[in-house]
Amino acid sequence: MSVSSQAVSPELAAKAKAAREKLDAHTYETVQWHFHPSTGCPFWLEYAQGLKFDPLQEVKNYDDLKKFEPFKDEWLRGGPVRRWVPKAFEKDPVYVFETGGTTGVPKSRIAINDFRTDYSLFSETLPDEYFPRGSNWLMLGPSGPRRLRLAVEHLAQFRGGICFCVDLDPRWVIKLIKKGWMEHLEAYKQHVIDQAITILGAGHDIKCMFTTPKLLESLATALEKQGKTIKECGITGIFSGGTEFTPQWTRFAMEELIEGVYMTPTYGNTLMGLACSKPVTPDDGYKISYYAPQPRAVSEVVTFENYDEIVPYGGTGRVKLTTLTKEFFVPGFMERDEGERELPYEKYPWDGVSGVRPFHELAEATTVGVY
């Protein structure tokens, strides 16, 4: 089902067509980069030798990526991690970021500047009225080997501020939940929130914050016991992310937790970067629709039966992610999430996804911690 057949304006349809052409060209350039012997990474150069087609010759546009098998997350577990470093960057300083890791070997991805690029682009979507340039930030989220902490720190610095962080190990949180140690879980949560309240009360002139829905609610509750609100602590803008973002929770947060404070939901992970949302309003039932940062990353909603088939607009399916940067190429990674396919939006003229939630076939095995 094409955009042109939907109830969108001719202007938006034209923007969507131009965005698709840009994506096709970017896909071609990315594949040429990762599969050329002079620039590609050892993993993809070795992988290409076992293919029945030549990516350099036969991948001309985004749809041609279907020629690859779905990306296996097991490929990201274990080393050597340098097999993912493109030859063109082999002399550059390399970061490694991890996802998950609650059991077994965690998935890892390399990065050189992608996290800075992604969050510099994201910065342009933040309204200066609520995220004043030069303001300091609080990072109330995971620390450790995660991209998010460094990315938020870069965002604060990029906007002229300084970022203050808490110590938070989400792997320990999930272990506590799985063991049923609720008393320990509550104590650890309070330990994290105490850190945040100490920072906010230390005179650092913090106006902006990243946090997750669960931590935001815990912070607001703890401040209420002290007779304070998040707004009274000086916060004017919050960018937040996590699977707990539902229309019901968002309405509750805006009306009860952060009245007078601007909040923008995001959907992101270590592989993709950051998907922005349309403005969340009461008129739209507090619906949250996310749009990946094309052409650097693409999210699609595909049928549960065939991961190469996109669902109709409004249809439900599994989220499929493709990453297309010079540092990292991931074609067709199946996320542990599902949702509904959304029409392009004026600011982001490509498909979006709403109602993001754990993929139903994995939901029972998914433990949601601080996210």
Image: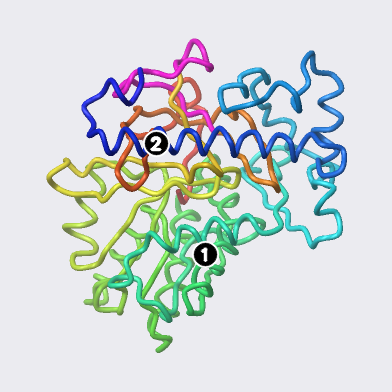
For label 2, the residue is 350
Residue 230: quadrant of the picture: bottom left
- Nearer-the-camera pick, 283 or 58: 58
Residue 166 placement, left or right of 52: left
Quadrant position of the N terminus in the picture: top left
Residue 259 appears left or right of 223: left
Measuring 30% from the left and 78% from the top, which residue is drawn there? 233
Q: In the rendered structure, which amino acid carries the disc numbered 2?
A: Trp
Q: Amino acid at mark 1?
A: Val
Stretch in magenta = 303-321
Q: Is residue 313 above or below residue 32?
A: above
| Residue at 66 percent of width and 17 percent of height | 67
Magenta-colored stretch includes residue 291: no
Q: How many angstroms separate mark 2 from mark 1 (CA)?
A: 26 Å
Residue 121 in the image: state x and y as whole percent: 49, 58
- Residue occupied by mark 1: 152
